[in-house]
Amino acid sequence: MYLNATTSISDFETCLSNIGFLDPKQEQIRSIEKPGEGNMNVVLRIRTNTRSFIVKQSRPFVQKYPQITAPIERIDVEYQFYKAVTNKAIEPHIPKILAYNADNHLLILDDLGDCKDMSYLYDKRNISTAQLQQLLDIASQIHTSKLIEYPENMELRLLNHQHLFVLPFLKESDFSLNTIQEGLQELSLRYRSDETLKKEISKVGQQYLSQGNVLLHGDYYPGSWMTKEDHIYVIDPEFSFMGFAEFDIGVLAAHSIMMTMNIDCLQTIKSRYPGKLNEQLLAQVAGIEVMRRIIGLAQLPLKRSIQEKKLLLEMARGLIMENS
């Protein structure tokens, strides 16, 4: 059964009762609401007479972009991620699993309460040293998870690979960037015609698709970071896989660069992250993520002038091509 914000309370109670999560005789649903805009999955907050919790359900398409197909099994990857990160240091930063039902592609999580995602930092044009360090510490704890096996998540990685390494750099596209911001289409052409640049991007893309030995969150950006006062939670790990640490950390770096309009954060990241990082690969991932967020489909609430985006793209190219 597919659930959404318009599903009746009685149908919701029946569904949750059928999977053994809720007894309608003891607990009644009071309200169903959307806690925020989910990109990949349907996400709902359920309030009962005794508690509140979050229900997530995957579909065979991307919730925000229904024209894009996506593997419905991705909710299982998210479930496997939360089961895998058992380190005591990470527990305060992720939601607790309350129930999982594979047949209905349902994951039920503890409600983190009144949080907001950290996309507000784009408008603030800053990320504090304390926030950056906390995010690095959380990522490093994820990366130290010891696993015997983990889902390859290849179907979702192939989808992400297209949007990261391929589609933003096509010379011809049905999607005009001028519908996002006037002049952006013309700005993109320099990079979409740069074969040397695209060759380097392709190399990193192939490494992204290869098997690694580090558990990654896989989508480590402000939409996956939730904050309550000074505390940070990390959610939405459906893109997780075993790969290379520089991917998560490079994406973190990229969004820090887009917030602050400079690359100073890279030094902080390299000195703070406890493991050894390939600095060239880290810089390349950061540069590619900056580029795809500006000239790709996966746009951000990034209010920057066309001149500022030009500067960000120049920075990104430098990061990708340095030492290449």
Image (cartoon, helix red, strand yellow):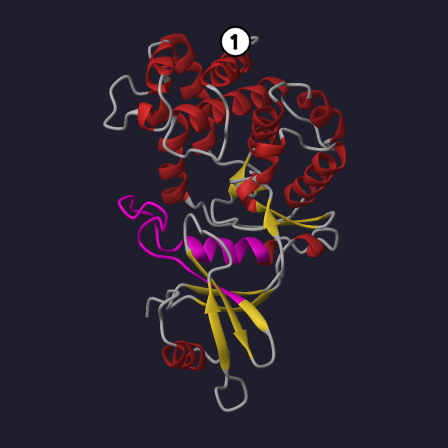
Residue beneath the point at 73% across and 25% down: 268
Residue 245 visible to an observer of this rendering: no
The image shows residue 14 at horizontal and vertical percentages of: 39, 81
* Residue under label 1: 324
Residue numbers of the magenta segment: 54-82
Whether residue 59 is in magenta: the answer is: yes
Quadrant where the image shows the N terminus: bottom left
The image shows residue 155 at horizontal and vertical percentages of: 36, 44
Q: Secondary structure at mark 1?
A: loop
Residue beneath the point at 37% across and 68% down: 103
The image shows residue 56 at horizontal and vertical percentages of: 46, 61
Please identify the quarter of the rendering in which residue 252 is found: top right
Residue beneath the point at 59% across and 39% down: 120
Task: Look at the picture and state if 242 lies above or below 127.
Answer: below
User: Is 175 situated left or right of 299 in this image?
Assistant: left
Residue beneath the point at 63% across and 18% down: 262
